[in-house]
Image: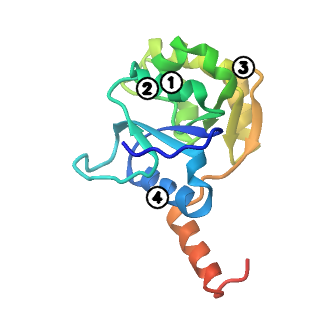
Amino acid sequence: MDLTLKDIFICHIVYECDFIQLFNDMIVDSCDWQEHLFVVYGNHAWDESKKYNLRNSYYIDSFDDHYFMELIEKSAQIIVHCLYTPDLTNFLFQNQHLLHKVNWLLWGGDLYLYRQVGSGSNSEKNEIKRRSIIKNIAYITVSFEEEFKRALDVYGGDAQYKFAFYPQPKDFCEYRLETARGKIKP
């Protein structure tokens, strides 16, 4: 494990997949990567044998990991990149004292899990916990304010809206390279 963190850092809770690798690369290329920690709790890639190389990452087998808890407590903000897995839902439900610094970065589909309660995608037990979590988180970050309002209509709460879009990291990195080469004017 090779972590380099500044005193104030953001903790991204993620699982391995192609998108997260590109997102991590974008953070490394475009931000102060020492202000970002990627806690990886699983692999949801189509090809589970594929190897990823996430910079400044800490892999956990369980949310009961003591060093993970130390890191998450120290973090200035927790960005949850998908809020639908029962393991993550259970962790946040059991650690509601952290919700004041949780930022739910919507990937679209996980907002609409309330429509699938009782299915294999979202058990009733998981949805009850999600409702409690979402109602008490600090921020919801999404491209469209309508989705933010929908989240508040469905789940309630006082989360603050933050605008962001999920760029296609590959396109973003290529844009930055072309800009740096002077081929595109910013």
Q: Nearer the viewer, mark 2 or mark 4?
A: 2
Of the residues shown, which amino acid type is indicated by label 4?
A: Leu
Determine the secondary structure under disc 2.
helix
Label tally: 4
Between the C-alphas of marks 3 and 1, the distance is 30 Å
User: x, y percentage for residue 158?
Assistant: 77, 22
In the displayed structure, 43 sits above or below 26; it is above
The front one of 52 and 90 is 52
Of the residues shown, which amino acid type is indicated by label 2?
A: Tyr
Q: Do residues under tags 2 and 1 come within 8 Å of each other at their CB atoms?
A: yes
The front one of 27 and 139 is 27
Residue 22's tag is 4
Residue 115 seen in render:
no
Q: Do residues under tags 3 and 4 come within 8 Å of each other at their CB atoms?
A: no
Residue on which the image places disc 1: 70
Residue 67's tag is 2
Between the C-alphas of marks 2 and 1, the distance is 5 Å
Badge 3 density bin: few <14, some 14–19, many ≥20, Cα 10 Å? some
**Sequence-earlier tag: 3 or 4:** 4
User: x, y percentage for residue 151?
Assistant: 68, 29
Determine the secondary structure under disc 3.
loop
Q: Do residues under tags 2 and 4 come within 8 Å of each other at their CB atoms?
A: no
In the displayed structure, 2 sits above or below 11; it is below
Badge 2 density bin: few <14, some 14–19, many ≥20, Cα 10 Å? few
Q: Residue at x 62, y 40 (%)?
A: 9
Residue on which the image places disc 3: 156
Q: Nearer the viewer, mark 3 or mark 1?
A: 1
Residue 8 seen in render:
yes
Between the C-alphas of marks 3 and 2, the distance is 33 Å
In the displayed structure, 88 sits above or below 96; it is below
User: x, y percentage for residue 130?
Assistant: 55, 19
